[in-house]
Amino acid sequence: MDAATKKRARPADPTVSDKVEQYLFSLRSAWIDAPTERASWYAPGGKILLDCKILPPDGTLPAGFSRSAPGRYQYNLGRWKDADRYRPVAFRVPFLGQETFDDKECTVSHLCHNPVCCNPAHHTLESLAFNKARNGCPGSAACRHVPRCLIPGPFCGPG
């Protein structure tokens, strides 16, 4: 067989970690630092500083992202499973390898209670019931959630 008739090798399908890394690279290339200060009864000085990140408010989105509603985004994973185009909620993508990724009963909890924060370190994938339970959590050493809440929930009164 001569060089003109050789078939080109098809690249290997991307792995879960490849897709997650691609997502994180795209996200980090566009996010903006949005440090958030929250009042807290247990923090020194009564305030906690959170390392929140947001997508640009001017509407520019990182590669692969599309807006599905105000403050809500999808991420195009491209070919995935049996679909030619798979677009889950963007903040779920870091949890792609988890068994509960496609579970409709699970949602992404924002441990910082900032719904526009896109810092993956502030997210966890859990049931909606666990997510809602965080709203009354006192935070700090009193928090019994795994992972722990970063701040007290909005419905938690002072300690």
Image: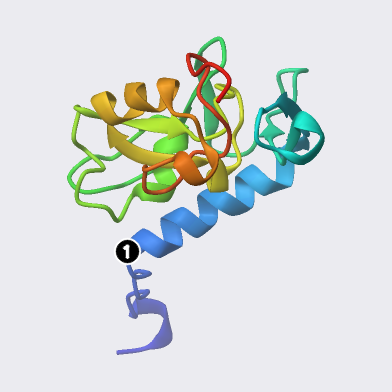
Query: Is the residue 138 above or below the residue 18 in the image?
Result: above
Residue 30: x, y in percent? 72, 39
Q: Which residue is mark 1?
A: 13
Task: Give the position of the N terminus as an image quadrant.
Answer: bottom left
Query: Which sits in the foreground, 44 or 149?
Result: 44
Q: Residue at x 68, y 29 (%)?
A: 55
Farthest bottom residue?
A: 1
Task: Give the position of the C terminus as an image quadrant.
Answer: top right
Callout 1, which amino acid?
Answer: Asp
Residue 60: x, y in percent? 72, 25
> Is residue 104 toward the left or the right of residue 19 in the image?
left
Q: Secondary structure at mark 1?
A: loop
Query: Which picture quadrant has residue 40?
Result: top right
Farthest right residue?
A: 45
Q: Residue at x 46, y 40 (%)?
A: 142
Applied colour scheme: rainbow
Query: Which sits in the foreground, 96 or 154?
Result: 154
Query: Is the residue 39 above or below the residue 111 in the image?
Result: above
Query: Is the residue 58 above or below the residue 108 in the image?
Result: above
